[in-house]
Image (cartoon, rainbow, N blue to C red):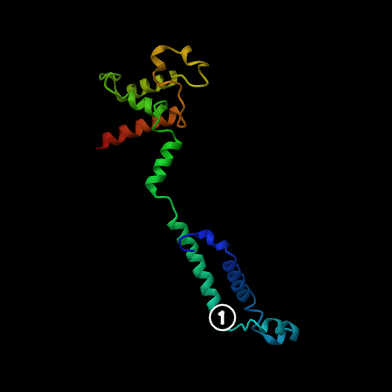
Amino acid sequence: MRNDATLIGHPVILYAIHHWQQLLRWEKYSVDKSVHSENELNEWMDYEISGKYIKSARKNLEEIGKALIEGARRQAIPKEHVLSLKIKDLKLENKNTYLYVAWDRLNLEYINQTHELAERIKDIENYLHELPSGDKFRYLEDCPVELQKYGYIDSVIDILTVIDFLKDCWKQVCLL
């Protein structure tokens, strides 16, 4: 079970868990024999509930719990793989996203060196708003030729988030 948490569903393991739960459930019931009828006591006498069995049941259930947690941790996806999956989910490797276009627009050929940072970021933001996306142009051919370079924008991350990211990056660079 430490390597595969789904083994908890095996009939033998389920029976053992049920048995140990019953022992713990009836632990308090069996303590005071004067309160119970003879029939009730005889029914549970077969279990021979004593301190040793109760401790063993409690320990076994605790170990199963630890094994479940450890098994789940062992099967956890490595953080590198999670990052890779997140990049694919956000389509960050695609060239038809706002983030890619904004990053591309940071090239010197598109930047006016005389502009302040705020103006440069505003230029990029304006450019991103002009790009063809499903809600602006029905057909890619309907938009200006210079904007067809990236195709239709299919971005999970919106323009505002990209612009905020650029501003945060610039602040970090200024702090260095």
Q: Is residue 106 above or below residue 52?
A: above
Query: Left or right of 32: which side holds 99?
Result: left
The residue nearer to you, when weighing 33 against 84, is: 84
Expressed as whole percent of the image width and height from the top left, the position of residue 152 reads 46, 21
The residue nearer to you, when weighing 74 against 161, is: 74
Q: Residue furthest front?
A: 11
Q: In the figure, residue 103 lies in which quadrant?
A: top left
Query: Left or right of 54: which side holds 3?
Result: left
Kind of residue at badge 1? Tyr
Number of marks: 1
Residue assigned mark 1: 53
Q: Is residue 143 above or below residue 31?
A: above
Expressed as whole percent of the image width and height from the top left, the position of residue 115 reads 28, 20
What SS does tag 1 mark? Answer: helix
Q: Residue sitting at 43 percent across and 12 percent down?
A: 144
Expressed as whole percent of the image width and height from the top left, the position of residue 14 reads 59, 66
Q: In the figure, residue 92 lies in which quadrant?
A: top left
Look at the image and tell me in which quarter the C terminus lies.
top left
Expressed as whole percent of the image width and height from the top left, the position of residue 87 reads 41, 37
Q: Is residue 55 above or below residue 78?
A: below
Q: Residues within 10 Å of mark 1 (few under 14, many from 20)?
A: some
Q: Residue sitting at 71 percent across and 87 percent down?
A: 34
Q: Residue sitting at 71 percent across and 85 percent down?
A: 42
